[in-house]
Amino acid sequence: MSSPSGEHAEAPPESPEDRRRTRMGLLFMFLATLCFLVMSAFVKILREDGMGTSEVMVWRMAPSIPVIWLELRLRGQKLRPKVPTVLFWRSFFGLVAMAGYFYALRALTMIENAVLFLLQPVFVAVFSPVFLDERLRRSALLALVIALAGALLAIRPDQALRLNLPLLPFLVGMGAAMCSACAHMLVRKATAKDSPELVVFWFTVSASAAAVALALAVGELRGLPEGLGMIEAALKITAMAGCGLGGQLLMTRAYGRASAPMVAMISYANIPLSVLVDLLVWGLTPGLDAIIGSALMIGAGLLLVRR
């Protein structure tokens, strides 16, 4: 609400119940970040095993459908959404973000992917006025500039060009981060009318159908890659799909309890966790550029949540 002079009035102080909901939302998002990190590690492993992007998307989404459907039935919830248009666009942006992220994962390290996706919380803050009618602070624009500088420092496109390394995975990853931000905004809007489980259900159904169509169109889903056994594939797919479903449910609950920029900032915990996964699973250590770039992006996140 604006004053006659055009300036926005200060928001009323939070009640104890609001603070409790915010803390729960931030906790849910932290747990979702852990789930998505483990999921991403298995996505990268399966991509390195030879699975295509759309094929991994199918196995990431489809196994979750009966699980969510059963939960909705047990709760007696109807499957018809109250805001189908919002859910459609949430599914569209989520699908594009997932495809871009899975594509980039094969070429980039976990820390490089994490750095690129640190742009997502900044995009959330920038897009909030469009999707949620939230006032954009000047600090959000400054945070965006700092975050972009940090991302460029971390991925060093000048070095990539000099060493003749492909820039496409980096560009796709940045585009995926932007689409993910749009999807997260729409999650918050959808959960104002529909339950988190219903939002996740329709996203899973839509993304699975699109992924199957894409996989068939490009000639995938014709068997396991050579050298990947059935039991090994089943274990990896189960871990990926289970963590992905858990992350979706936790993230959706988080956006239903706390403001979008605050929730999105929790994903910055992905950086130290990704460094640990890179080190333990792939034996990779981040360079100084990645560390400084990540520090800039974390600073951008702190700027966003500053009162």
Image: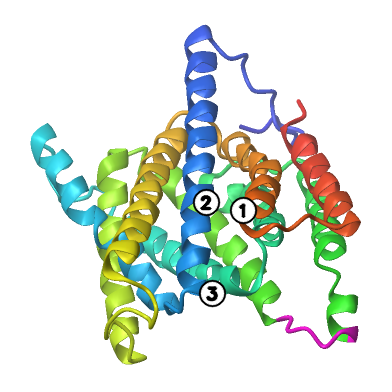
User: Which residue is at the front of the view, 189 or 242?
Assistant: 242
Identified by mark 2, the residue type is Phe
Magenta residues, as a range?
162-167
Identify the element where label 3 is drawn: helix
Identified by mark 1, the residue type is Phe
Q: Quadrant of the N terminus?
A: top right
- Relative height, residue 48 to residue 265 (above, below): below
Q: Are marks 1 and 3 in contact (CB under 8 Å)?
A: no
- Relative height, residue 172 to residue 24 (above, below): below
Identify the element where label 2 is drawn: helix
Q: Are marks 1 and 2 in contact (CB under 8 Å)?
A: yes
Say which residue label 3 marks: 103
- Give how far across and how far down residue 67 sits, in percent: 19, 47
User: Which residue is at the front of the view, 177 or 111?
Assistant: 111
Say which residue label 1 marks: 127
Q: Of the numbered discs in the image, which one, if any, rests on residue 131?
A: 2
